[in-house]
Image: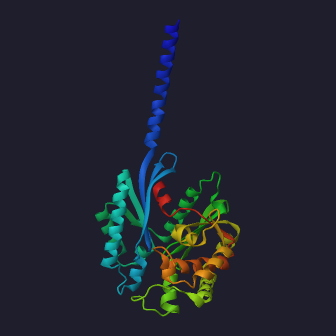
């Protein structure tokens, strides 16, 4: 009797193992290590993540890094609207080093996007072609609308909230050379996207302060710090820009919807200066810190992006004032999360 029972149990174990094998094999086939690259106007970001391609979800982050590369500043100094050989070498060195580190995790693909400065530069496509060939990656220049929609997808993915509707969110992405605000709404029963596409951004505001307000030679001095008593002048300029460039509908949405901040300006520059509680900051938080930091020079500020840190505060403060945005929730997302899922 014991022998019969033992045989039955053994057969049950074998049967269970056999039935589990296809499920395990399927699960393994669904998981890919993918690398995504977000090449912006002032920095290059990379991330390697486990991606469930069957469920379209992101898993464990295996590697991430970002490097400052001042493409926008280089183009501003150019006399022929071309990115210089020097900045190309800097960018390629940074990219190659990050890709080499990413390859340790054996990603099955390395894809990415290039944004504003590469759309603007006369040799932007040529530079990206060179990077693809020499760094063995697959980068493409995307439009500002594509950038906005990719940022929205990244933000929603990073929130990890079930039953979250697109119509509930307004995603605010600030780059070096462009800014996007993206939201969705129902129009006659059809979900449509509404995108604010602006040119006033991190580096462009910093350049306005140094070139116009401070009358500095950009070849000799590219920092606006300390901004000091020019704070109110900068805020008036940002407020004027918002009033004349942002649609009435987007202004209404900014007041009523949940505003999600993504990208380096929200996620690093503003957050590192304000240290927001629960990843959320208010207009009062930004005002408090900007009033203090406008009197600081570069030597009193920290980090690789200090030349734009204080002007970033004024950029965000001016937009929040003019659009009456009560608070911004910062989500650790760039364009990469969307790239990985595509």
Q: Is residue 315 left or right of residue 256?
A: left
Taking depth in this image into account, of 44 and 337 the one nearest to the observer is 44
Q: Residue furthest left?
A: 134
Residue 64 picture location, percent across and down: 44, 59
Residue 214 in sight from this viewpoint: yes
Residue at image point 64% right, 63% down:
169
Closest to the observer, 264 or 188: 264
Percent position of residue 335, x then y: 49, 63
Residue lying at the far bottom in this picture: please name it.
215
- The residue lying at 31 percent from left, 60 percent from top is 136
| Quarter of the view holding residue 109 | bottom left
Asked whether the viewer can see residue 114, the reply is: no
Up/down of 203 relative to 221, above or below: above
Residue 191 locus on image (x, y percent): 62, 60
Which image quarter: residue 327?
bottom right
Viewer-proximal residue, 32 or 152? Answer: 32
Give residue 262's position: percent from left, percent from top: 55, 66
Q: Residue at x 60, y 83 (%)?
A: 238
* Colour setup of the view: rainbow
Does residue 183 lie above or below 81 as drawn? above
Q: Is residue 170 left or right of residue 70?
A: right
- Tell me where residue 40 sits by quadrant: bottom left
In the depicted structure, whether residue 340 falls above or below residue 206? above
Image point 49% across, 88% down: which residue?
A: 210
Q: Name the residue furthest front.
A: 300
Q: Tell how many labels.
A: 0
């Amino acid at each position: 009797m014991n022998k019969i029972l033992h045989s039955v149990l053994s057969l049950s174990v074998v049967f269970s193992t056999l039935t589990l094998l296809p499920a395990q094999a399927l699960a393994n086939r669904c998981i890919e290590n993918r690398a995504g690259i977000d090449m912006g106007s002032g920095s290059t970001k990379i991330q390697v993540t486990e991606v469930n391609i069957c469920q379209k979800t992101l898993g464990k982050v295996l590697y991430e890094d970002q490097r400052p590369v001042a493409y926008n500043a280089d183009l501003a100094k150019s006399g022929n609207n071309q990115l210089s050989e020097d900045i190309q070498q800097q960018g390629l060195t940074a990219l190659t080093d990050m890709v080499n580190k990413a390859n340790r995790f054996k990603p099955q693909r390395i894809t990415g996007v290039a944004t504003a400065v590469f759309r603007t530069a006369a040799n932007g496509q040529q530079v990206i072609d060179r990077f693809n060939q020499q760094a063995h990656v697959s980068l493409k220049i995307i439009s500002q609308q594509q950038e906005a929609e990719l940022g929205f997808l990244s933000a929603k993915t990073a929130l990890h909230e079930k039953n979250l509707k697109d119509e509930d969110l307004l995603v605010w992405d600030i780059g070096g050379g462009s800014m996007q605000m993206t939201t969705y709404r129902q129009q006659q029963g059809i979900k449509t996207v509404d995108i604010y596409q602006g040119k006033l951004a991190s580096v462009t505001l910093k350049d306005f302060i140094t070139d116009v307000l401070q009358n500095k030679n950009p070849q000799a001095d590219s920092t606006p710090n300390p901004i000091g008593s020019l704070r109110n002048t900068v805020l008036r300029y940002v407020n004027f820009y918002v009033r004349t460039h942002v649609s009435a509908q987007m202004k209404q949405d900014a007041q009523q919807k949940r505003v999600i901040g993504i990208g380096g300006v929200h996620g690093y520059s503003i957050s590192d200066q304000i240290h927001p509680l629960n990843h959320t900051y208010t207009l009062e938080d930004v005002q408090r810190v900007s009033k203090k930091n406008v009197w600081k020079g570069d030597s009193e500020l920290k980090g690789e992006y200090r030349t734009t840190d204080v002007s970033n505060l004024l950029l965000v403060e001016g937009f929040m004032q003019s659009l009456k945005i009560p608070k911004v929730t910062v989500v650790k997302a760039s364009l990469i999360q969307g790239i990985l899922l595509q």
